[in-house]
Every structure is written in C-alpha cells, then in structure tokens.
C-alpha cells in the first residue's frame, strides 16, 4: 500500500468518526462506553470458545425465567421459535442452549444481519485503502453531470440516509409489492445492486433516514467491484479476512446471478460463529493482535447517524437508544450501550460493552410475538452484572 493511500485512508476514517461523534453530541447522545481489550489469560476463540460459568452476581432464578420465556413454544404447530441462545462474557462462552432438533452444528440464516457483514466488507476495504467512506460512491448509473446522486457517499449508504427511493417499504401495507420483495425475490433479483441503483432521490441527501436493504446491496455491489473476480472473488475475500481470520468457518454468503453478494439479507453461519462475529466488534475490530477493521470504525458503527429522524441506527448496526418518533427501541430493557446486528424473525447478535458481553438469539418468530421474545431477551441481558474495566 502506498504511503499516500495509507494517509488518505487514515484521514478519511478519522474525519468520518469525528463527524459522527460531533453529530451525536449535537443531538444529545450519550458518550460511547469504551470497548475493552481481550483478556490476556484467555485464548482467542479462533479455534474454540473457552468455556466459563454464569457469574455469581447473576440472579439465576430470573435468568432461567427469561430463558424459558424465549424457548416457550409459540410457532406454528407448537414449535419453539428460539432455536439458539448463546452468551459470551469477558471472552468466555458462559451459556448455550438449542431447541429440539438444533445444535452447535446447525446453520442459521442471517436475514438482515447480513447488513452488518456488509459493514465488515466496507470496513476491511477502507482499512486496505481501497475505499474512502467520505467520498462519492462512483456508482456508474449516477455519473451524468447533472445527476445529484453523484454526491451520495459510501457513508450515506452505510447510514441509510442516501435519500434514494429504495427503502424497504414494509409500511406500505402490501409486502408482496414492497421494494425489498421486488429487489430480492422478483424483477430485481438477478442483479439487486443495479435494481437499487436505478431509483431517484425522494429526500435531500443526508437528511432523512429510511431503512433500506437497497443501500446494503448497493454497498455489497461496490465492494464486489473493488474486490474483483465476481462471486468467487468476494467469497475468497470473505474467507481470508473474516472466516479464517476469526474462525467463523461455517459462514456461507449467497450471491445473485450477477455475482453480487446479496449483502442485505443472505448469510448463513452457526450460532458460535455469529458470536465470533459479534466478539470482533466488541473487541474494536481487533483479533488476536491483528487490526482487521480500521481504528475508530466500530465507534463510527455504533454512533447514531446525523439524519434528522434517527436515533437508533448507526452504520449498518442498530443502536439501543431512545427512539425518535416513528422508530422503535431495538432491545427493550437492555443497556443503552448495546448495538446489534438484527435480522427478520428476530435474529440478533447483541454487543453490550457495559457488560463486556455478546448475546446471540436465532430462530423464528410470529409477527405478533415480537414483544414476547424481545422483552425477555433484553431482560436476560440486563440481568448480568457490569464488568469492571481492566
């Protein structure tokens, strides 16, 4: 990597983090809880998780009630909606349970947790000096001199405040005609990034937050073009920089016919590997002495972006802060420091700096059961004692 490219990468990330933090402070957001280093006396979980026990300060009776609430049969036919529950604290796997018929070798679908995998892809390419998050995206469809979309940056897409008319549209009342359905399963499914790009602005760039899988597939297309080699190139890149690097060996991305990683919805992994992914972010993007994500990237990721109508979204991760009108609390009861990868049917990797903890919940959920599952998961996390800074 050339010195000029390295300097530009460092400056762009520093500016991005500074801008995010200043914007958060202006909005009255609380300061970020510092991320701790990995305990020196515990092996990194690249090959296997060190086993631990639930802490003495935990109210075990309350904890067990929350677990039973999560695993209570609610699904069609009386099946358990929660299929996997894991808790990692201070570097050790201290709790693990699976529903009948599932186990540590079972693969679980990400749904929108794949958006956080896309955050990782962008971060690694920024660390390598191959992408600048503060620069315009260079999306080919937007390069006419009079096209205002030329000014959209990677950060705008990461923060879902591009202003494009490619929001998921779940509130439209008809899921079958929602933008995400058409893009992922319908007319746009062969090349979802191109489909998402061919939309116009409906809000001023940077001003309005709208949850957008289209932003994620645009980012994953940009990453794939930078990596090169189509689907195999992106798969190899993920293999080297994520799956092998942190021991997330079961990870399986899905690709469209165009060769684009469908970085908004489709990534499969075992529960212990989802915990490894969360642990990488709990440790500030460092693994076993090696910095994988840029210095400051995780803080940028977990800072609320500057859109006027946002308080609970950072950069392809959800934040457990008090919501703005029209938003919702991501994980009621859990600490405000929590940030999370979350997907449909309530897949979640919750990262909790206050407790030095990662909690994973995977499975299914019926639409009307969200409170019945989110609330005990948040309460389960809140039951853990805080971990003293080392």
Image (tube, grey):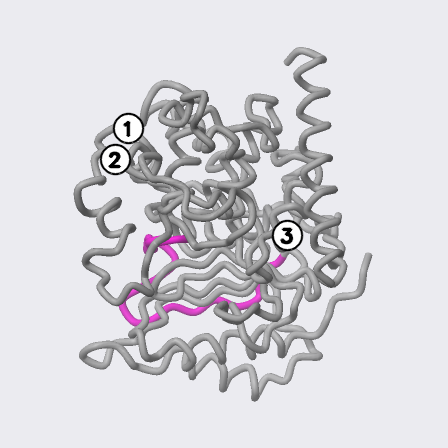
* Residue placed furthest toward the top: 2
Q: Which percent across, then down, holds residue 131? A: 55, 25
Task: Tell me the residue that label 2 is attached to.
Answer: 256
Residue occupying image coordinates x 36% and y 71%: 82
* Residue placed furthest toward the right: 390
Q: Are marks 3 and 2 in contact (CB under 8 Å)?
A: no
**Mark-to-mark CA distance, 3 and 2:** 31 Å
Q: Which percent across, then down, holds residue 243? A: 46, 37
- Closer to the chain start, of discs 1 and 3, is 1
Question: What label sits on residue 282 in the rendered view?
Answer: 3
Image quarter of residue 59? bottom right
Q: Is residue 244 left or right of residue 105?
A: right
Q: Which percent across, then down, holds residue 136? A: 53, 28
Judging from the image, what secondary structure is the residue with disc 3 in? Answer: helix
Image quadrant containing the N terminus: top right
Residue occupying image coordinates x 59% and y 57%: 308
Residue occupying image coordinates x 53% and y 68%: 95
Front one among 208 and 88:
208
Q: Are marks 1 and 3 in contact (CB under 8 Å)?
A: no
Determine if the magenta segment contains residue 97.
yes
Numbered range of the magenta stretch:
92-112
Q: Nearer the viewer, mark 3 or mark 2?
A: 2
User: Can I make out residue 383 in this image?
Assistant: yes
Judging from the image, what secondary structure is the residue with disc 2 in? Answer: loop
Task: Tell me the residue that label 1 is attached to.
Answer: 259
Front one among 328 and 110:
328
């Amino acid at each position: 990597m050339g010195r000029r490219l390295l300097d530009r990468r460092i400056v762009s990330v520093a500016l991005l983090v500074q801008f995010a933090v200043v914007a958060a402070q202006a909005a009255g957001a609380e300061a970020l809880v510092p991320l701790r280093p990995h305990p020196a006396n515990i092996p990194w979980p690249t090959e296997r998780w060190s086993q631990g026990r639930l802490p003495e300060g935990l109210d075990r009776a309350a904890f067990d009630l929350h677990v039973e609430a999560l695993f209570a049969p609610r699904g069609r036919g009386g099946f358990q909606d929660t299929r996997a529950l894991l808790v990692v604290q201070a570097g050790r796997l201290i709790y693990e349970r699976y529903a009948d018929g599932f186990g540590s070798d079972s693969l679980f679908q990400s749904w929108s947790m794949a958006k956080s995998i896309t955050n990782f892809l962008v971060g690694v390419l920024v660390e390598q000096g191959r992408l600048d998050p503060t620069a315009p995206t260079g999306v080919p469809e937007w390069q006419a001199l009079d096209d205002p979309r030329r000014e959209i940056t990677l950060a705008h897409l990461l923060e879902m405040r591009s202003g494009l008319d490619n929001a998921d549209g779940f509130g439209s009342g008809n899921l079958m005609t929602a933008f995400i359905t058409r893009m992922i399963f319908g007319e746009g499914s062969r090349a979802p990034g191109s489909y998402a790009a061919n939309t116009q602005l409906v809000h001023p760039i940077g001003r309005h937050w709208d949850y957008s899988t289209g932003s994620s597939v645009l980012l994953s297309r940009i990453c794939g073009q930078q990596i090169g080699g189509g689907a195999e190139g992106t798969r190899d890149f993920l293999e080297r920089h994520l799956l092998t690097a942190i021991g997330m060996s079961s990870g399986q991305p899905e690709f469209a016919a165009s060769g684009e990683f469908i970085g908004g919805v489709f990534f499969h992994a075992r529960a212990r590997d989802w915990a490894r992914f969360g642990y990488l972010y709990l440790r500030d993007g460092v693994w076993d002495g090696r910095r994988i994500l840029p210095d400051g990237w995780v803080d940028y990721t977990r800072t609320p972006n500057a859109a006027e109508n946002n308080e609970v979204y950072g950069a392809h991760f959800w934040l457990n802060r008090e919501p703005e009108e029209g938003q919702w609390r991501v994980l009621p009861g859990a600490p405000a420091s929590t940030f999370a990868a979350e997907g449909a049917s309530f897949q979640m990797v919750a990262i909790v700096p206050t407790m030095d903890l990662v909690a994973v919940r995977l499975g299914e959920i019926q639409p009307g059961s969200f409170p019945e599952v989110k609330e005990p998961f948040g309460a389960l996390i809140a039951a853990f004692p805080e971990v003293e800074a080392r």
